[in-house]
Each structure stands twice: as structure tokens, then as C-alpha cells.
Amino acid sequence: MIRPFGWNEFLIIVMAAQWTIALSAIAFAGGGIGGLLIALARVSDVRPLRLAALGFIRVFQGTPLLMQLFLVFFGMNIFGLAINPWIAATIALTLHASAFLGEIWRGCIEAVPSGQREAATALGLKYYNRMRYIVLPQAARIAVAPTVGFLVQLIKGTSLAAIIGFTELTRQGQIINNATFSPFMVFGTVAVLYFILCWPLSLLARRMELKFSRATQR
Amino acid sequence: MADTHAHTSKADVRGASGPAVTMEGVNKWYAEFHALKDINLSVDRGERIVICGPSGSGKSTLIRCINQLEMIQKGRIVVDDHDLTAGGKNVDIVRQETGMVFQSFNLFPHMTVLENCTLAPMKVRGISKAEAEGTAMQFLERVRIPEQAEKYPAQLSGGQQQRVAIARALCMNPKIMLFDEPTSALDPEMVKEVLDTMIDLANEGMTMLCVTHEMGFARQVADRVIFMDRGEIVEVGAPEDFFNNPQHERTRNFLGQIS
Ligand SMILES: Nc1ncnc2c1ncn2[C@@H]1O[C@H](COP(=O)(O)OP(=O)(O)O)[C@@H](O)[C@H]1O
Ligand SMILES: [Mg+2]
């Protein structure tokens, strides 16, 4: 039976945004840790480590996010784990974010002039202290804008989790649409909600970028 | 600058026996390119060496091998009785005991002058923040910029930045100081303040290897001047002999060009 798209339906969609936010936040946090490890491996002196990280990045950058979701989702089944959209979406998006953030941050680390590392080495600082106090803080300043930019992509990317049955914003929209058959109202609402999530972040990224370019001109 | 101007002995008071630096048959390649060819050099404790030579002759490479910013492929380097070729801990020790000053200063731009000076003593030597800051202020006074301690490098002139870089290296209490063209990136009016700082340091008996084309400085403080060309040490001599009576054609050409 078709019911009208009313206030109630609207609220159900709005509430589903929390799952989009939760999934984005977890993937971003996990991807932050994974991305740091990938970035450090990419700039390491150990060749096998560099190559492994490069392979990881290439695989995740060279395949659609949807396939990554499918592979994790169905792969879990093959390995005898219960199919769970939550866990599958979290794992797939975390790996995805690790690869992309790893590549972004590698560039930022390499943008720190080599003289900085050399000066730190010459002072007797070893790898951990060099990275922690000299290289990463300088790389982080460059990294803010592209990282926020990627977060926007990641939030939009979580919509694909709908296809493996994870009920976030997009899937809740599909469900409501099946009941109300008001696709324009429903997906218009969904799109506006994504926009409300992403637009402030885009603005923030742009402001950071400006701030950084002004700081480097000084 | 200091109260120890009466330094006369060439022997370092901090014990240890051999020369400050020994290089034996050192060869270094960048891929196919032979950057250092059979370098033999022994630097005594307290000795001041000036290294000059045309661009690309391997001067930077030579002094960067001493604290192993560059690895050598053949030969032996011993610094303060620690054999670098043995690797491992020795490299760490040698880096702690040699200070380096770069052409482009390489101060840490995200840290204040004081933080630049205290980071390594705290993280490498493990001394307290208060003690590190005390030592840092002492050295900043010696390079005559204590009032800049809370500023960031970008707020300082080139000459001031280079003096901070010297103070930063001295805060690690090094036995040997390496300088790689420390005045080449400076505006002419700032060269003197940095050279004066280096002269003070030499007068205190610091073992120094300086890559520089400041021949006035070489005449005044060097015990020996080394001329390098195409990865080789071509000529070594006391400044009077080196400048007044160079033995090699290549040295004469070079001296003719720079003066
Ligand atoms: N990292 C490097 N990779 C390849 N070649 C290098 C590298 N560093 C220096 N070289 C080469 O080695 C030679 C000596 O360099 P360098 O020691 O910097 O000379 P100098 O300090 O006397 O100008 C130059 O020809 C330079 O091009
Ligand atoms: Mg050089």
C-alpha cells in the first residue's frame, strides 16, 4: 500500500543521517590510522615495505569502491564469518580511506624539505623523534585541506554501503521511496542532507587551503 | 665571547686518544657517479680545517660522510674513536657528537628559536626542559641573539637564523663542528656576523671542518686548507703556503677565479 510522504517519513530519513555520520566517522578514524601507516611505509627506507604499501594503494585506487564493498561483504562469508553489512561496510571503507589518505599524506610528507630531516638527523634525533617532532607536524599543515576534501568524498562514498544492505541515508531513502513512491521528494531530501553534511566541510577545506597558501607565501 | 681564550693545546680535554676524524681510502658513488675518490684525511682534535673547491667537487659529500648523512661504499671513517664503518650504535654516537651547520640553515620553521635549541638535548640526551632551556639561552647569548628566543625562524634575518643554527648545534655539546658553506646563502652584510661567531668558536678550541670560500676566514683561523676537485683532495696545506705558494695548477686556477 502506498502511503504519502509526510513529516514522519521526512524525520525517518533525517534520523538515518546519523548512520551515515557514524560510518563516515569510523572509516575516517580507522583510515587515519591505516593511512598514517601506509604513508610511513611509502616513504620508508625499506624497499619491500614501500612496494607493499604502493601495491595496496594501487589496488584501492584502481578499483571501484562498490567492488571493494562487495569483495569484503561476500569475502567474509567465504571465510566463514556471518554476513554483517555493518562490519563489512566498516572494513571496506576503512581500507579504502587508508589507501587514499596514505597516498595524500605521502605527498605531504615528501613536501617537507629534505633539509629538515637532515638537520634532525645531524642533531642525533632518531626516526621516531624525527617523524614525530619535525616531519609530521610540518606535513600535517599541508595535509589539512586535502584531508578534509577526502572526508567529503568519503561521506558521499558511504552511500554505496546501501547496496550491501547497510541502512544509512541512501538506503533509508530507498525504503521510504518504496513505501511512498515519491522519488523526487525522497531523494531530494536525501541529497539536501548530504549537502548539509558536506558543504561546510568543503568550505572549511577551501579556507584551510587559502590559509596555507598565504602562510607559505610569507 | 668566552672565558677560555687561552686555549693553546690541540688536545681535546674530554679524553679519547686518536684523531678527531680519520678517513682512509674513502670512496663514494651516487649510482654510477664517483663522487669521492680515495679520500685520505686525518683531522686532529682542536684542528680547524677549511675545504674549498669548485661547485660539484664533492665538498658537501665529504663532510656529510662524517656524520653519515651519506653512506660510503669503500674505505673507513673513524670519528672520535668510533668506527662508522662498524655501523649500528657508532653512527648514533657520532651524530650526537658532531654538530652540523647547513647552507640553507634548516631551522625547524614550526618551532621557536628556543624550541629549535632544546629539542635534541631533551629527546636525545634526555635532559630536563629547564636545563635544556638554560643551556640554550647560554648559547643564544654567545651567538648574541638571546632576545630572539621566543620568535619563529621566519621572523629572523638570514644571519640571525644561521647563528641560531650554530647555537642549536652547540646545545648538543658536540666535539666536532661541520659547516657546509654557512655564509653562501646570506646577504653580504650578514656574512660577517656569522663568520665572527665561527671565529669565536675556533678560538675556543673547537674541532671544525668548514666548507667555505671565505678566504679571509681561512687565512685567519684555518690550520690547514684543503682543495678539492672532481671528488679528489688535490692539495692540502697551511694557509700561508696554500695561498701564497699553491703547488697544483688546478689550485692556482681556482684561487685565481675566486679572488
Ligand atoms: N644525492 C645525490 N645524488 C646524485 N648525485 C649527487 C647527489 N649529491 C651530490 N651529487 C653529485 O655529486 C657531486 C658532488 O656534490 P657535492 O658534494 O654536493 O659538491 P660540492 O659541495 O663540492 O658542490 C656533484 O656532481 C653532484 O651532482
Ligand atoms: Mg656543496
Image (spheres, grey):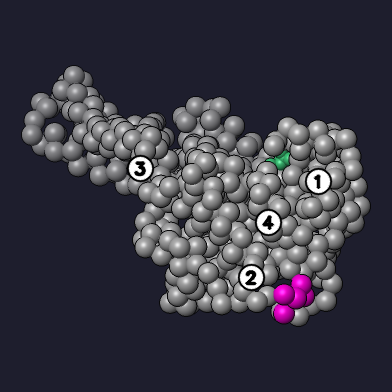
Q: Chain of mark 4?
A: B
Q: Chain of mark 3?
A: A
Q: Are marks 3 and 2 on the same chain?
A: no
Please name the residue shown 58% across and 46% down the image: B183
Image side of residue B84 versus residue A5, left or right: right
Please name the residue shown 55% across and 65% down the image: B120
- Residue A115 location in percent, x, y? 58, 46
Q: Earlier in the sequence, mark 1 or mark 4?
A: 4
Q: Residue furthest front?
A: B244
Q: Residue at label 3?
A: A24
Residue type, numbered disc 4: Gln
Residue sitting nearer the eye, B90 or A60: B90
Callout 4: 10 Å neighbours few (<14), some, many (20+)? few
Question: In the image, which is nearer the foreground, mark 2 or mark 4?
Answer: 4
Q: CA distance from mark 2 to mark 4?
A: 14 Å
Q: Secondary structure at mark 3?
A: helix
- Residue B230 location in percent, x, y? 83, 36
Ligand 1: which quarter?
Answer: top right
Q: CA distance from mark 3 to mark 2?
A: 61 Å
Q: Which residues are magenta?
A: B8-13
Q: Residue at label 4?
A: B220
Quadrant that contains the N terminus of chain A: top left
Mark yes or no: residue B136 visible: no
Q: Are marks 3 and 4 on the same chain?
A: no
Question: In the image, which is nearer the foreground, mark 1 or mark 3?
Answer: 1
Q: Residue at label 1?
A: B244
Image side of residue A43 versus residue B22, left or right: left
